Image (cartoon, helix red, strand yellow):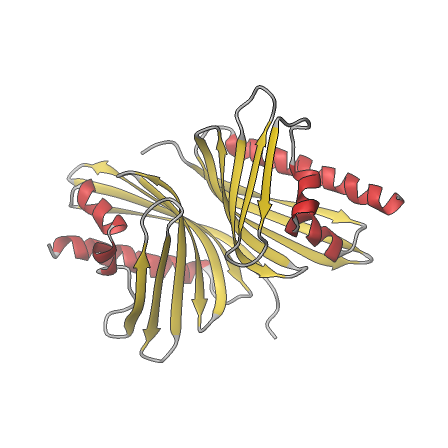
Amino acid sequence: MGFVQHGGFTLERTYSASPARVFAAFSTKEGKSRWFNCFGELEEAEVELDFREGGRELNRLKPPGRPPHVMQGLYHHIVPNERFVLSFTLHIGERLISVSLMTVEVFQEGAGARLVVNEHGAFFEEGALAEREEGTAVGLDRLAGLLAEDDRS
Amino acid sequence: MTERTAVHDTFRIERHYPARPERVWKALSDKDAKARWFAGPSGEWDLLEHTFDFRVGGHERALGRFASGVESDFNGWIHDIVDGERIVTAYTMHIDGRQISVSLGTMEIGPAEGGTRLVYTEQAVFLDGQDNVDQRREGTEELLDALGRSLSED
């Protein structure tokens, strides 16, 4: 049997933005594109997000001089503005890095929102799970910065 | 109205079958061979619809009805296949139209002394308290036992 590490993580954040705004940062192509890219400059980017149960997502991001990172997702469960569950694969070039299940929950907290992101999956390379948790944490912090910027403008 | 909860849990089951890996793989990947074990309790559950498109990106559906009239609806989508070794499937379960869970199931098989070792890992989220990991593990153990029986019937 080949290398498989099963595991996952849960990340929590609180934002001053409303649950609806936080939810839109995940459920719309425009919202997600703002924080999801962790590479900065891109040579190519292709994003599709069909946010409905049974709908698919594609994020194909190619940083300069590196193979494309391709996330392909499928939405299994949606309660608007509250939670959703998707499964997705990540390929780097031709290599399958992981298959995982992600649950995103958004709760009202005071005037703002509390976000809980849970990801569990099968990771096919050593270190891939730790890297995923780190990358996701950085993305959620980037989102915090963007939401705060929107509040100021 | 039920309270909204999302409970995450994981379980792992190992089985040893006195059959060659090729036969176990067939029971996992062939529609007719799978239908012999992937079912509710015999005599208490009828299969109403089974589709199985075994390829990466393919969909599987097993819709059934218990004698009580309750309908169970399994929908799986295959994310990864390593021929003869591994299948990773995301699946949802609905009972009477209510979604009770979303899971990621990794099925791995390999040769072992006298037959085949199978390791199944499921990472699940149970929605609104409508199912739990103990029930799911128990149900899956019964299925994998039925898989073993289906191999010895040949």
Q: Is residue A137 left or right of residue A120?
A: right
**Position above or below: B79 against B42:** above
Q: Can residue B117 be seen in this view?
A: yes
Front residue of A60 and B116:
A60
Q: Is residue A12 visible?
A: no
Q: Is residue A149 left or right of residue B52?
A: right
**Position above or below: B99 against A104:** below
Residue B145 percent across, percent down from the top left:
24, 56
Residue A6 percent across, percent down from the top left:
45, 40
Q: Residue at x 30, y 63 (%)?
A: B50
* Quadrant of res A64: top right
* Quadrant of res B134: bottom left
Q: Residue furthest top?
A: A65
Q: Which residue lies furthest to the left in this view?
A: B154
Q: Is residue B152 left or right of residue B49?
A: left
Residue B100 percent across, percent down from the top left:
49, 64
Residue B113 percent across, percent down from the top left:
18, 36
Q: Which residue is drawn at 31% across and 67% down?
A: B49
Q: Quadrant of the N terminus of chain A?
A: top left
**Position above or below: B71 against A112:** below
Q: Residue at x 28, y 38 (%)?
A: B83
